[in-house]
Image (tube, helix red, strand yellow):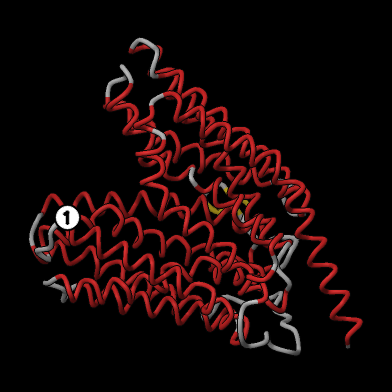
Amino acid sequence: MRLLGLDVPRESRLLVFVGFVDAIGTGLYIAGFAVFFTLSAGLSVAEVGLGLTVANACGLVALTPIGMVADRIGPRLASIVLHYWRAAGFVAFAFVHDFVAFLVVSCIVGIPTRAIEPVSQMYVDRHIGKDLRMRVLSVLRVVYNIGFSVGGLLTTLILVVGTRPAFLAIVLGNGATFFLAAILLARVPLLADDPPDGRTARGWPRSLRQGRYLIVTGLNAVLVLNITVLTLGIPLWIATRTEAPTAVVAPLMVLNMVLVVLLQVRFSRGTDTREGGTRALRWSALSFAGCMAVLALSGQLDPVGAVIAVVVATVLLTFGELWHFAGRLSVSYALAPRDRQGEYLSVFWLGSAAALMVGPALITVGVVEQGSFGWLALAAVFLGVGLLIGPAVSAAAAQLEEEHEVANNAT
């Protein structure tokens, strides 16, 4: 079947539709949460920022334990529970009028918001299997971007109305999409679901004792900084350090989204294996480094040259983003033992979540405020990741194979 011009396995049509529904609600919330909490719920900007920071911290702490629970109960039940959990949390936001209530509900929502990513990745693997999972995940990413855009447009209409009931549609609408997604997920078949006979052991996560695996997770976390570069670094750089007009920022974001929709499936081809995923991560790091170098140059150019430079930088960043998406998924699958897939994927996402938390401070203070030198320093960091990622993935895979052989010999 071809959906929205994308080659989607027939068995995955419902899952892709679930992703679209989910993304509409998320886009609705992302575009309107700041306005809702400040104008409708009566919170200050500082209170909103602090509450969301604490919520992210709660999500980080709970991420790996929930991944281990998913190993025990299976990805279907775990995904459905997390969707209902998020739905209830967003409905609760409608009754928030003070900081304490906001903090409590934010933490309740923050936990499943972080945990759903690795559990969903696990779900896709059990749904369609190794051969098709990268194609399905790539299609889902395209659909997510389209859904985000639809949600953002709906938020624009809500903000035009500007009444309390309209503002409530931001959180209640997001909650409704999670309820619907949970109901539909129960009907998505798990065609490749062959969990091991024994469930994962209790106690301290084994993945956190594997230094080589954690190195790969850390290197991937550095690459995750591209998200903050796009959403915060480039806009601030254009506004404060270049001759380019600030009006160019919005078209750059649109350019990024359009390229993702058009090219994600193509850039994911050949990444089904560990080697293919590693190669994609290497290309991603090189593309990010090129982007940083062009940004450093843009601060020295006239208005026309600066505009051309930031456009080129955005294209390079987007290419790196496309390779990074495919590469990190492929490598994280390859390094996750099937009987502990939820645990290992959660630890891999743990590094990404940590990078998103520290990214704003790092990119603003450590890069943008340092001028061109800051971008060149970040380019060097990305080049270093590109050089190290291959040996690091190979070393982590060797360590897993050694431990697997030891376990087999012991039994």
Label 1: state its secondary structure: helix
Query: As drawn, is 33 to the left or to the right of 341?
Result: left
Query: In the displayed structure, would residue 358 be above or below residue 192?
Result: above
Can you tell which quarter of the image residue 345 is in? Answer: bottom right
Q: Is residue 348 or residue 250 the one in the foreground?
A: 348
Does 94 sit left or right of 128 as displayed? left
Quarter of the image where one finds residue 347: bottom right
Q: Position of residue 353 (x, y in %)?
A: 47, 59
Q: Quadrant of residue 332?
A: bottom right
| Residue 131, position as x, y percentages in the image | 75, 61
On the picture, is 381 further left or further right than 94? right
Q: Is residue 302 above or below residue 355?
A: above
Check the image and report above or below for 366 versus 345. Answer: above
The residue sitting at the right extreme is 409
**Residue at 74% across, 53% down:** 393
Three-letter amino acid code at disc 1? Val
Residue at screen point 69% across, 75% down: 191
Q: Residues within 10 Å of mark 1 (few under 14, many from 20)?
A: few
Number of labels in the image equals 1
Q: Residue at x 57, y 43 (%)?
A: 322
Q: Which residue is mark 1?
A: 45
Q: Residue 217's x, y, as percent?
A: 61, 57
Q: Nearer the viewer, residue 223 or 39?
A: 223
280 on left or right of 248: right
Of residues 408 and 112, the one drawn nearer to the viewer in this rendering:
408
